[in-house]
Image (tube, grey):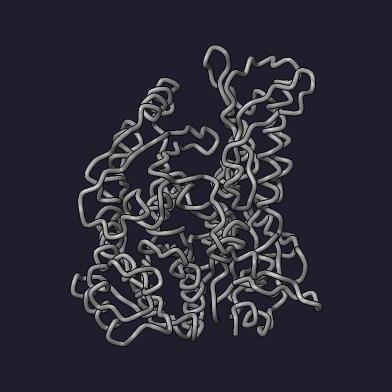
Amino acid sequence: MTDIEIARATKLEPITQIADKLGIKEDELEQYGKYKAKINEEAFKRLHKEKDGKLILVTAMSPTPMGEGKTTVSIAIADGLRKINKNAILALREPSLGPVFGLKGGATGGGKVQVAPMEDINLHFTGDIHAMTAANNLLSAMIDNHIYFGNELKIKKVIWKRCLDLNDRQLRSVNTGLSGENKIVPREDGFDITVASEIMAIVCLAKDLEDLKQKLGNILIGYNEDDKPVFAKDLKAEGALSVLLKDAINPNLVQTLEHTPAIIHGGPFANIAHGCNSIRATKLAMKLSDFVVTEAGFGSDLGAEKFLDIKCRKANLKPDAVVCVATIKAIKYHGGALKEDVQKENMEALKKGMHNLFVHIENMKNVYGMPTIVALNRYTTDTEEEIEFVKNEIESKGFKFSLVEGWAKGGDGAIDIAQKLVDITQQKSELHYSYELNEDIKTKIQNVAQKVYRAKDIEFSDEAIENIAKIERLGYANLPVCIAKTQYSLSDDDKNLLCENDYNIHVRDVILKTGAGFIVVLAGKIMTMPGLPRVPAAEKIDIDENGEIVGIF
């Protein structure tokens, strides 16, 4: 059976019953049909003094192009915790339409460990990402409208981009205002994918509606004729943007196929954004349960680094344990096996690929001080010899190991890791950051590159050096850095999978995000608007004569 067929074969509980399990009251729930709801501000007000549950962060080694199942493992762990009678909840990101119709597919898990309703979550869900797209593009319209009607603010350079939640490389760089109308000013513009937009970051980092409005007002939209910054609040835009986002800031409640509550909210990409679900969702989940399982996108060099260095710092959070997901195929892929050969037995590639996995788990333990366990996400093509080899290698280095079989067995396939996590989360630990905020921008970037990526050095383009100097002149040097680079390698080169030789990180640009409160660092050839693959998933997605969606995976 396909994932979508497994999901449809499972009878879901009404969302009101899922809310009852968490003690959420009727006036705190806003239903979107029978199986989806938003949790409103009333719940935050009532629960803010409750004790926090344990926080478990799920990350991974460097992935293959198809991903390694962080969401699948996260769901399995939450279901597994419930199987051993622990009060557990999920706090995940919302899927983006880009991957759904592109290469990776959806982000609702797989097999017997899924969040549901699967099609809704993968597509429009409760409209959060559409609201963010609208807010982003309203600000763009207000900028160009202000320029059209006389440009009182004397805006000379616009840096704010439009966005769209689809993969469309044709929109990376565009010319606008070409209608030839009187007074219209043509200019160069471009599109980011919505999940990499500053609006998405702001929604995910905002504490409440008032904080959201303030962050929206602080968005840097460009510079005037005196090279002074111009902000969204100078256009009086923050109120209207907040109106569009007033529902989108409230977390969404759904369930797993085993009826474990799941809060799904926010969906930034970790290779080009900060890669974590919203602070509001995580903090609410911690008030509602004893164990919260959350994830951070792509490998730990991206999602987990930003979760720890950006989100935890801003929200005063600290994970009680880190799970690093590995797969046999990813280990082989980073050991030199070709993409099409990762499911074939290849012990040489498996041995070489362990280097990548060890970098990730050593970073979590030694750089950040986090208690860490490796979850081997089992595939049907894995052999017992391969599994035993990986297990022995990990345990010989003093790390904990668990074989997770959630895809085939549901929560029963994650009981071992659930029990180990209960023990691990009792350990005392202290979160360390990879850099300090009072360090200069170059030093912060260098610390991440050398401590986390294991790079030899950093090379800055002239444009990056110029922009760093400008950010420091404007007084924003104390912000955290959000490095955008390929997810396929520890380096910034997606072809350098083994990372056997010394390599440098190449910083081509640095962009100030005053609303979100971080500095984006573009490394290598990373793009903030992805493209579709040669054969996109969209070609297989359809709707049948009964109105049933097919082809989403």
Q: In the rendered image, is residue 48 in sight?
A: no
Q: Position of residue 447 (x, y in %)?
A: 28, 42
For the question of whether residue 552 can be seen, the reply is: yes
Which image quadrant: the N terminus?
Answer: bottom right
Q: Is residue 537 left or right of residue 381?
A: right
The residue drawn where x is 49% and y is 37% is: 517
Compared with 211, 426 (above or below) is below
Residue furthest to the front: 534
Q: Furthest residue to the top?
A: 226
Residue found at x 32% / y 30%: 440
**Vertical position of residue 296 compared to residue 202: above or below:** below
Residue 228 vs residue 40: left or right?
A: left
- Kindly give the residue lying farthest to the left in the view shown: 396
Residue 521 image offset from top left, x and y in percent: 41, 39
**Residue 474 falls left or right of residue 107:** left
Q: Residue at x 59, y 22 (%)?
A: 230
Instruction: Please state which of residues 499 and 316 is positioned toward the viewer in this rendering.
Output: 499
Location of residue 152 in the rendering, given as x and y in whole percent from the top left corner = 69, 14
- Quadrant containing the C terminus in the rendered view: bottom right
